[in-house]
Amino acid sequence: MSDVAMSEGLEWATARGMGALAEKMGMRFTEFSLERCVATMPVEGNTQPVGLMHGGAYVVLGESLGSMAANLHAGPGRLAVGVDINATHTRSATSGFVTGVCTPVHLGRSITVHEIVVTDDQGRRCSTIRITNMIKDLPQDA
C-alpha cells in the first residue's frame, strides 16, 4: 500500500468522523486503508467500576473500525451497516491506551467481514472482534 493511498484513506476517515460516541470515548485514527485500519482509545474514562477496560468499550472500538472500513470499501453512493458483531475478551487493560487493528476477512459486493484485534500498550491481545456489514445502495434522494 502506498503512502499516498494510506493518507487518502486517513483523510477520508477523518473527514467523515467516527461519530459522537467514538469521539466521546477518545478514539483516534492512526492508519486507514482498505487493507488495514488502526485506531487508539484511552483506557481512562472507558472502564468498569473496578478499573478494568469495559468489554463494551472494546466492542465500540471494533465496530467503529469495522464499519468505517466497510464504508470505505462500499464506495460512493453505497452504505455499509452492521448486521452481526461478536467479541471474545481475553485480557483486561487497566491503564494507558488500547489499539485496535482492523483487517478484512471478506470484501464482497454486498457483505464484508472484518476482524479487529485490540491490544494493550504492551502489545498483549485484550479482545478479538468480528463484524459483518451489509452493503446497500443509498436511496436516490439521499
Image (cartoon, rainbow, N blue to C red):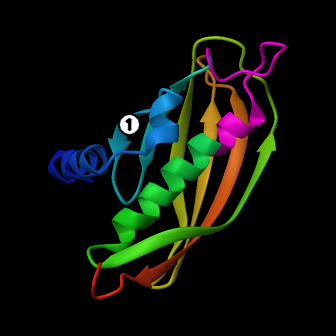
| Residue pictured at 72% horizontal, 24% vertical | 53
Residue 54 higher or lower than 3, as above or below: above
The quadrant in which residue 79 appears is: bottom left
Whether residue 81 sits left or right of residue 115 in the image: it is left
Whether residue 22 sits left or right of residue 75 in the image: it is right
The total number of labels drawn is: 1
Residue 104 higher or lower than 9, as above or below: below
Q: Nearer the viewer, residue 51 or 105?
A: 51
| Residue pictured at 82% horizontal, 16% vertical | 49
| Residue pictured at 37% horizontal, 69% vertical | 73
Task: Give residue 39's position: percent from left, percent from top.
Answer: 45, 36
Whether residue 2 sits left or right of residue 43 in the image: it is left
Task: Give residue 113's position: percent from left, percent from top.
Answer: 58, 68
Q: Is residue 55 magenta?
A: yes
Secondary structure at numbered mark 1: strand
| Main secondary structure found in the magenta portion | loop
Badge 1: few (under 14), some or many (20 or more) residues near its Cα, within 10 Å? some
Task: Give residue 93's position: percent from left, percent from top.
Answer: 71, 20
Q: What is the quadrant of the C terminus in the image? A: bottom left
**Residue carrying label 1:** 29
**Residue that sits furthest to the left in the current view:** 4
The quadrant in which residue 126 appears is: top right
Task: Give residue 96's position: percent from left, percent from top.
Answer: 58, 12
User: Which residues are drawn in magenta?
Assistant: 44-59
Q: What is the quadrant of the N terminus in the image? A: bottom left
